[in-house]
Image: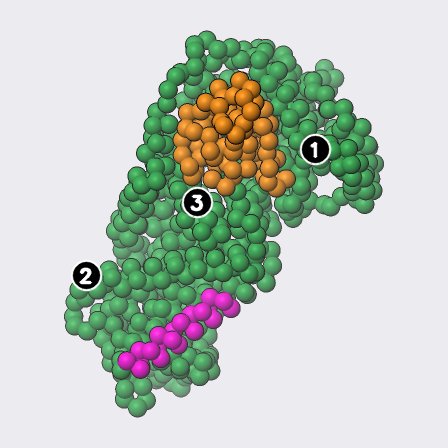
Chain colours: A orange, B green
Amino acid sequence: MPSPLQPSGQPERLPLCQLPAGASGRVYELSGEGAFRERIRELGLGESTVVTKVSGQSPVICRINGTRIALSHAAASQILVERFGSGA
Amino acid sequence: MSASAAVSSVGSPSAARAPVYALVGNPNCGKSTLFNALTGLKQKVGNYPGVTVEKKVGTAYSQHGQPMPVIDLPGAYSLAARSPDEAVTRDVLLGRRLDTAAPDRILCIVDASNLERNLYLVHQILDLGRPVILVLNMMDLAAKAGVRIKVERLEKELGIPVIPCEASQGKGLIELKLAMSRPDLPLPRHRWDIPSPIAPAVSELQASLLEYDRKAPLSARAEALLLLTDQDSVRVAGSTPLTARTTDILQSWKVRWEGQGVDWAATLVASRYDAIARLCADVLERVSPEEEGPSLSDRIDGVVTHPLWGWLVLGGLMGALFLSIFTLAEYPMTWIDDHVAQLTDAVKAAMAPGDLRDLITDGAIAGVGGVVIFLPQILILFFFIGLLESTGYMARAAFIMDRLMSRVGLNGKSFIPLLSSYACAIPGIMATRTIEDAKDRLVTILVAPLMSCSARLPVYLLMIAALVPGETIPVGTKVGLMLLMYALGTSAAFGFAWLFKRTLLKGEPPLMIMELPPYRLPRVRDVLLQMVERGGLFLRRAGTIILGISIVLWFLSAYPKAPEGATAQAQMAHSFAGQAGHLIEPAIRPLGFDWQIGIGLIASFAAREVFVSTMGVVFNAQSDADDTAPLRQALAAARWPDGAPLFTPLVCLTLMIFYVFAMQCVSTIAVVRRETNSWRWPLFQIAYMTGTAWVVCFAVASIGRLLGY
């Protein structure tokens, strides 16, 4: 479902907290403090990781490569993902 | 000998000493289960000096009965430490701690069903220049998930022994012990190219670390790599700071990279993950397609993290916990109480009357007995917490509580410490070591003693008994007042946390991120082991301090001696304690307390429950926590010099409120002093808690008097 705000052909980018349950995406960008970004990367949620949202608003539960990771809403809003199946 | 020396000089121990193993792994990968399975009951639990992180050392035996010491290190995701317990793991592995020699070999355990993520820590550990044995735990789960791991391939790629096992079933332990007792373990063959923009910096730092910081040749590279990702915000006792030379090199590289727009930390982490991804592509084989749809864990999570059901489940579990703490614990507590009384009687019968006998019975036995009596509650609490942790529920509970905690500026990780504090603030404060943010940790430590602990119970019970006229106390009144006290303490804890986070310890609410382990059936043996361990630590920690304080207090109330033939009451008034009571009377008079209550307040500074026994001595009545009737009558008969009753309902209520807030526990102060490494915070804690107690009590007493009570 292409977003009207995005030119078609561009994948939709949205914070992880807004990714609908069941949808998957690829991590595009991390923001927030250095220590937070590093911990996220070490947990395997670094840039270009494929992530599937399992459920929830707070906590946000998602799956990365078989591991279930929970993030508070604030933490999930710092992770920008490119949604699969959007755009092109 | 010569053959093994050729393979590795570090890994082969001299004939005189068995190699020391360190056991490391991610949280939730079955590390404790493996440690328990390897070492059985031969474990020594202590603390790393300077931080209250448990130091567990056990002994495993080879097939030939040769002992092999194993150090269990706190679970970590990375050597770049974020919390005090991860810092211990890093520092022990790097040989930075003066109190623990660097281990000879490393036993690295991973969750085979989650290999890629777990290999990150392994990847860092392979850099350390020590022989490593990789344990692939939970092979059954990996097989169930349809993944086959080519063990031989992995062995070949890493150049180290790889042992598949199922620690909870005892499978693979023999193979592991055989590998552990090999005299020659190869050093890891680790093919990993440091990304090119960073490589020159690593060599330069490595050289400087070798030359100026006197790091071991084999670990200097690992130290250099760590410098680039570790913010070193969690420095602990025992680790030495860097030399100026190395710091300069690090700084100048960072400046250069910033200019070029290189995110060095991200590059390093990403390149490790790239290497791991290549390795996994080689050694992992999917034998059955990935299961579609939500797993059982997902379905359970759908309920327990649900906005409504989640709270109900958590509320139900907490209700069950409190119910069992306060009802189930009663039987063993009565049993302990009876036996302490029997012991006292036995000593009294066996010894001639005199000061030494009184010191033993009234000082040592009464004091230590007063602590031991709370052991059942502590054990039940830890059994529950251990059970919930081993099923995987605790991580979910922390997240549900995060919604509430974030309103006062804390995060969900403060939940377990605060919950534990309902039983006793000491284990609660010890549990704060998993909190990553230093300020959050401090705020949690500061407010934890406001949660009504079980030592306050006897005081509440006595005061409720004295407050309500008539022979029996209506259950509704008892429960209502009790709940009021708990609610008061809990809201004060949250209120002060909110205040501290906005004033003294300002900081962004930390972002919460946690791995949710899959739900598992609890391993009762591990839960029981942990419970016994915690109970033992509690006894030792609190017991030694309380014993000392009890003896001092006994002395203060027994000396100086009143003239011959004086009653116990007169002796108390004459003693140092009595004099101290008179001394503080002006300060507590506005609250409606006299010098006799003052003695109780001073004595119970050691531990709150001492108040009850002190009142027993002061008002000359034999009593204990279970049977408050005689003491209650004695309290009802107590009068001010002008004949007005001392223990009016208002005074009883005020006293209860005083105990809700006041910092009356020497053991807690000692633990806070240790945890924060300074006297500043425990002193601040005494000041703010007891100050609040005075102000609130003064307000209650004044309003009560205005209303004519």
Residue at mark 2? B475
Q: Look at 59% across and 18% down and name the residue there.
A: B277
Q: CA distance from mark 3 to mark 1?
A: 31 Å
Q: Look at 43% across and 29% down and name the residue there.
A: A20
| Segment colored magenta | B687-707
Q: Amino acid at mark 3?
A: Asp
Left or right placement of residue B612 versus residue A65 in this view: left
SS label for mark 2 = helix
Q: Which mark is residue B402?
A: 3
Q: CA distance from mark 2 to mark 1?
A: 65 Å
Q: Look at 76% across and 24% down and name the residue there.
A: B196
| Nearer-N-terminus badge (3/2) | 3
Q: Residues within 10 Å of mark 2 (few under 14, many from 20)?
A: few
In reply to whether residue B696 is colored magenta, the answer given is yes
**Image depth: mark 3 or mark 2 in front:** 3
**Image depth: mark 3 or mark 1 in front:** 1
Q: Position of residue B141 (x, y in %)?
A: 43, 19
Q: Amino acid at mark 1?
A: Asp
Q: CA distance from mark 3 to mark 2?
A: 34 Å
Q: Amino acid at mark 2?
A: Val
Q: Position of residue B160 (x, y in %)?
A: 63, 18
Left or right placement of residue B400 versus residue B479 in this view: right
B68 and B466: which is toward the camera: B466
Question: Where B344 sits versus B703, above or below?
Answer: above
Report in which chain the residue with disc 1 lies: B
Q: Position of residue B360 (x, y in %)?
A: 41, 65
Left or right placement of residue B94 versus residue B668 in this view: right
In reply to whether residue B494 is colored magenta, the answer given is no
| Nearer-N-terminus badge (2/1) | 1
Q: Quadrant of residue B303?
A: top left
Question: Where B174 sits versus B231, above or below?
Answer: above
Q: Which mark is residue B263?
A: 1
